[in-house]
Amino acid sequence: MGTKLTVHLQAQNFGSTGSAPVKDWAFRACAIQGCQQIYVVGLWAWGDKLTASNAAGHTADLGTALTGIGIPISLFLWAIGIVLFLGLPDFYRQKPGAVPDFYTSILRRKIVLWVSRQASWISLWLS
C-alpha cells in the first residue's frame, strides 16, 4: 500500500491531475528525457571504449565484465517497471471501450491505403 501511495504521489496521472499546470507536465517530461539521455550517453561511452579496444588489437574476453555491469542495470530497470506497474492507480486498469468498425473506417481513408502501398513498394524495390 505504501508503494502504491508513493508512486501515485510521484507519478501523477491523467485520471487524477487533468488540470495540472503545464509547467508540471513539462518538468516531468524533462526529467524522463534527462534520465533517458544519461542512459544513452553511458551506452555510447561503453561502445566507444569497446571500439577503441578492438581497434587497438585487444581482444580480451569481456563477457564477465559486461555481464557484471549489464545484469544489475537490467535488474534495476525491471524493479522500476514492476514498482510503476503495481503502483498505478485503478484508472489505468480499466478496460477500454470497443471501437466499432475500426478496420472498416481505416480502409476507407485513402491516405492509409496510399501509405500502405508506398511502404510495400519501398520494401519491394529496396530489398
Image (spheres, rainbow, N blue to C red):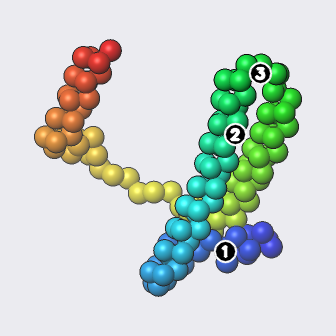
Identify the residue shown where x is 38% and y is 53%: 98
For badge 3, the amino acid type reads His
| Disc number placed over residue 46 in the picture, else none | 2
Cα distance in 3D space between marks 3 and 1: 46 Å
Identify the residue shown where x is 55% and y is 61%: 33
Element marked by disc 3 = loop
Please name whichever residue, 67 or 8, is drawn nearer the observer in this view of the structure: 67
Corner quadrant of residue 45: top right
| Disc number placed over residue 58 in the picture, else none | 3
Residue receiving disc 1: 10
Identify the residue shown where x is 29% and y is 18%: 126
Give the mark nearest the N terminus, 3 or 2: 2
Find out whether the residues at labels 2 and 1 contact each other: C-beta distance under 8 Å: no
Question: Which class describes the residues within 10 Å of circle 1: few (<14), some (14-19), or many (20+)?
Answer: few
All told, the count of numbered labels is 3
Cα distance in 3D space between marks 3 and 2: 15 Å
Corner quadrant of residue 59: top right
